[in-house]
């Protein structure tokens, strides 16, 4: 143990390996969200393949590395998968010649360490040079530990109710009504307890970004949020005696979406399309957004919604087809899809909208090899379920979910 | 409490402990850029205790 009252500096030294090493894993599937990855993981497991969910960049399902631990086992698995018609799986092989080694400078001495426990008596301020939002102050303790990607993760060990002080102010504005902030506190508490397994592969539970919930430690914690957290202490949302998937978004576009319209997996019956308005501006039961005319009228309506006037409430993006082609190719290449060799996207058509909220669409993309997209995800800035119905041409980089391959 | 079917309800959190310790990855990919750097700054008058897994000898 080393104790210091001075700043501790941490950097990395790229350490050459004695000889190049092959880092290899079987990637069974690639996804835009943890929810869809977990659903896929469950399917693979039901077929007898041990898996783990990882997030090197996008979410992926890997064949469990401890089980498929040799090149031979990995290739036998791939052979087996191919023989059963799987085209999405691939072996991700990288030759590594050096690796980052964390180096700490403490009291003027330098230490190379893979794992460090950091225990301040009071909250400690952490500055990371790639974080544009500046220094963060964390209560509890910290731990620097290696992860599955050959780098390191700084983990903050903190009690739930203290963690919420770093979440609620960043997920809802302080000018919101106090009861709305209390509702946000309950959602945030439920969300974290439901999602403790997200980063099991790396021995921590949640991230601190919009991939989970924004968490800035005690930085910018405020009295209004603190009161809401205290007033709802220990309160969570349940459905049939289980924690709900307490999904929320910054913007809905005027209507929330069903779970299955956004992600793979079993439906969450408590997540229903609801028009985001107190003025009864739209009746979904009589004017279904699955009808194209209704949908267009809904999108054209800009007043009467709670989000009216917000930047992300109604927006329009025009992308040249050349850009769409490039983005789609990158997306498919990242998935190592055999369809990535298409030559050109010639057109995009909406073939179908979801029955209730109108935001799930099947898209037709006439290209050299054409197919319809299902479960198009429209969210531009949030990983959580949101129905940005205002988009006319989706970002290709946002395409996600299952593809129904069919030649047009 | 048992929720009514079809309705999400707020309920007191029942599992033990009531205020569990969480592990939050606040910097997820430290070292993916060779220029990555962090500074841990104790509060004025406070100290930080570090436990190094592989011993305390400087290199």
Image: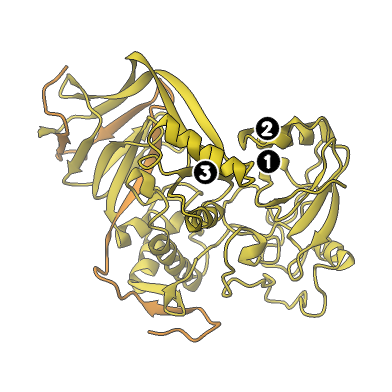
Give whichever of discs 1 and 3 has the lower sequence position: 3
Quadrant in the picture for residue A307? bottom right
Rendered hue of chain A is yellow
Counting residues from the start of the chain, the first of labels 3 and 2 encountered is 3
The picture's colour for chain B is orange
Disc 2 from disc 1: Cα separation:
8 Å
Residue A5: give x, y in percent of width and height: 15, 33
Question: Which is closer to the viewer, label 1 or label 3?
Answer: 3
In the picture of the structure, the residue carrying the numbered disc 2 is A330
Residue that badge 3 annotates: A60
Q: Are marks 2 and 1 in contact (CB under 8 Å)?
A: yes
Q: Which residue is mark 1?
A: A397
Question: Of A96 and A88, which appears nearest the observer?
Answer: A88
Q: What residue is drawn where x is 72% and y is 77%?
A: A279
Respond whether the residues carrying marks 1 and 3 are from the same subunit.
yes
- Secondary structure state at the residue bearing disc 1: helix
Q: Residues within 10 Å of mark 2 (few under 14, many from 20)?
A: some
């Amino acid at each position: 143990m080393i104790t210091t009252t001075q700043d501790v500096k941490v950097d990395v030294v790229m350490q050459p390996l004695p000889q190049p090493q092959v880092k290899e894993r079987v990637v069974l599937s690639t996804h835009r969200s943890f929810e869809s990855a977990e659903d896929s993981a469950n399917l693979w497991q039901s077929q007898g393949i041990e898996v783990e969910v990882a997030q090197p960049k996008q979410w992926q399902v890997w064949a469990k590395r401890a089980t498929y631990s040799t090149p031979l086992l990995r290739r036998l698995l791939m052979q087996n998968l191919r023989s059963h018609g799987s085209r999405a799986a691939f072996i991700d092989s990288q030759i590594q010649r050096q690796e980052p080694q964390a180096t700490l400078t403490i009291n003027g001495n330098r230490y190379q360490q893979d794992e460090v426990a950091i225990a301040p008596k009071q909250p400690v301020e952490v500055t990371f040079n790639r974080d544009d939002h500046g220094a963060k102050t964390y209560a509890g303790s910290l731990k620097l530990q290696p992860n599955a990607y050959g780098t390191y993760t700084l983990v903050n060990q903190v009690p739930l109710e203290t963690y919420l002080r770093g979440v609620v102010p960043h997920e809802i504005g302080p000018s919101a009504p106090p009861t709305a902030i209390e509702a946000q506190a309950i959602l945030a508490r439920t969300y974290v307890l439901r999602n403790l397994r997200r980063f099991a592969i790396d021995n921590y539970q949640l991230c601190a970004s919009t991939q989970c919930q924004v968490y800035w430690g005690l930085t910018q914690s405020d009295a209004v949020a603190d009161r809401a957290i205290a007033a709802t202490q220990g309160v969570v949302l349940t459905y049939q005696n289980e924690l709900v998937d307490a999904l929320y978004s910054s913007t809905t576009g005027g209507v929330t979406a069903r779970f299955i319209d956004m992600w793979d997996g079993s439906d969450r019956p408590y997540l229903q399309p609801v028009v985001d308005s107190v003025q009864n501006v739209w009746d979904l039961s009589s004017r279904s957004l699955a009808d194209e005319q209704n949908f267009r009228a809904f999108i054209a309506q800009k007043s009467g919604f709670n989000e009216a006037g917000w930047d992300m409430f109604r927006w329009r993006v025009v992308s040249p087809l050349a850009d769409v082609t490039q983005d789609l190719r990158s997306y498919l290449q990242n998935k190592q899809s055999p369809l990535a060799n298409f030559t050109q996207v010639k057109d995009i058509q909406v073939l179908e909208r979801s029955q209730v909220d109108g935001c799930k669409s099947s898209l037709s993309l006439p290209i050299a090899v054409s197919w319809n997209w299902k479960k198009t995800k429209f969210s531009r800035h949030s990983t959580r379920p949101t129905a940005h119905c205002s988009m006319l041409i989706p970002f290709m980089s946002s395409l996600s979910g299952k593809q129904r391959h069919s030649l047009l | 409490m048992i929720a009514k079917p079809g309705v999400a309800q707020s309920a007191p959190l029942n599992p033990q402990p009531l205020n569990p310790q969480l592990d939050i990855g606040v910097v997820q990919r430290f070292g993916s850029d060779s220029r990555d750097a962090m500074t841990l700054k104790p509060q004025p008058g406070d100290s930080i205790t570090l436990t190094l897994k592989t011993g305390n000898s400087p290199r």
